[in-house]
Amino acid sequence: MRILVIGGSGFIGPFVAAELAHAGHEIAIFHRGHRAPLPYRAIVGDRRQLAASAGAIRSFAPEVVVDLVLSSERQARDLLEVVRGVAARIVAVSSMDVYRACGVLHRLEPGPLEPLPLTEASPLRTSTQTYPPEQIAALQHLFGWVDRGEYDKIPVERVLLAERDAAVTVLRLPIVYGPGDALHRLYPLVKRIDDGRRAIIVPVARWRATRGYVEDVAGAIAAAATHGAGGQIYNVGEPDVLDELGWAQLVADCTGWTGELIELTEEQTPPHLRQPGNMEQHWIADTSRLRRELGYAERVTRREAVERTIAWQRTAAPQLPIYRFDYPAEDAAVAQAMSDLR
């Protein structure tokens, strides 16, 4: 099949394209041309102005379109206008931030905690504000495909799932980690380990959230591109969930670090490490439907995935100062906590 991968040169895209190409499909990637060329046909353009590239996209005549970088209702409608009558299948990459649990976590949604695990039928947010404004601003700096002032996957899903001229599959992604992660999720731990810290504070140590390694997430996306019926929604992510302390311990084990991981109360935690949300709301998803209906299974063990991510992280640093390090304050907090125990 001819498959177009929109956002094919970013974090997840190259793994998706490689998976599909390995299966024998003809691949084209749509991207802004800012990355090193990949061994596929390229269509260069701006995702926020997709109609400007309609001729090139229609010339490729994709049977399947995988859109990794949808951020707004406008972008969803633009996609349909460009590929309607050409593509028989659309795979739309969404996020678990559509769930009401995300709004509760960020204190943007009133009411009680959301029951877990989150299934594809769990309630969605009623608030159109997905994240606090400062987080949206950071996303726009890091990801050029995010519409200015707009980021909400709920209307994206609604528009695409109403389409009748193509079979649409929606994938709700978890916290994705791995080589190339623009958010550098392992950076705070790896930097502290490599800086020789003997004690590392683990903020919100008991909070739990579903994660997925980038290559495995790409495998789920590729499976949706070639299998299954339209109109379906799937949660993607690892089947078991570590809390933040368990995750930090795994990173420590993979590096051979033998220091001490410290769990503090919110009051004991230095201000630069405190999390502003309602951390009693965990973000745990049920991914059994994906496994049952598409035959999906991870191919990379969690330890190997973390080791690969650490190796990459040691060669890369965040483009923006999205994490803070104040070792004197951290040392003082640990010392005070130890003193309080005596």
Image (cartoon, rainbow, N blue to C red):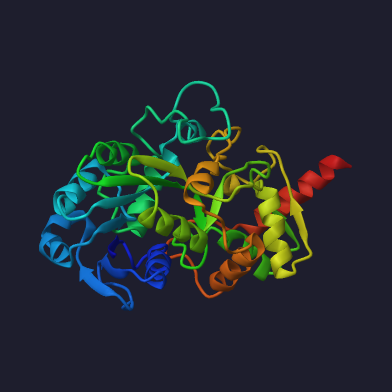
131 lies above or below 2: above
Q: Nearer the viewer, residue 35 or 329?
A: 35
Q: Nearer the viewer, residue 132 or 88?
A: 88
164 lies above or below 62: above
**Residue found 14% across the figure and 48% down from its top:** 81
User: How many tags in the picture?
Assistant: 0
Can residue 323 be seen in the rendering of this structure?
no
Can residue 155 be seen in the rendering of this structure?
yes
Q: Nearer the viewer, residue 171 or 70?
A: 171
Q: Position of residue 191 (x, y in %)?
A: 61, 66
**Residue found 85% across the figure and 41% down from its top:** 341
**Residue found 50% across the figure and 68% down from its top:** 179
Q: Position of residue 100 (x, y in %)?
A: 45, 31
Q: Position of residue 111 (x, y in %)?
A: 49, 21
Point out the residue furthest to the right here: 342
Q: Is residue 221 left or right of residue 205?
A: left
Q: Quadrant of residue 125?
A: top left
Q: Is residue 189 left or right of residue 109?
A: right
Quarter of the image where the N terminus is located: bottom left
Quarter of the image where the C terminus is located: top right
Q: Position of residue 82 (x, y in %)?
A: 15, 53
**Residue found 78% across the figure and 44% down from its top:** 337
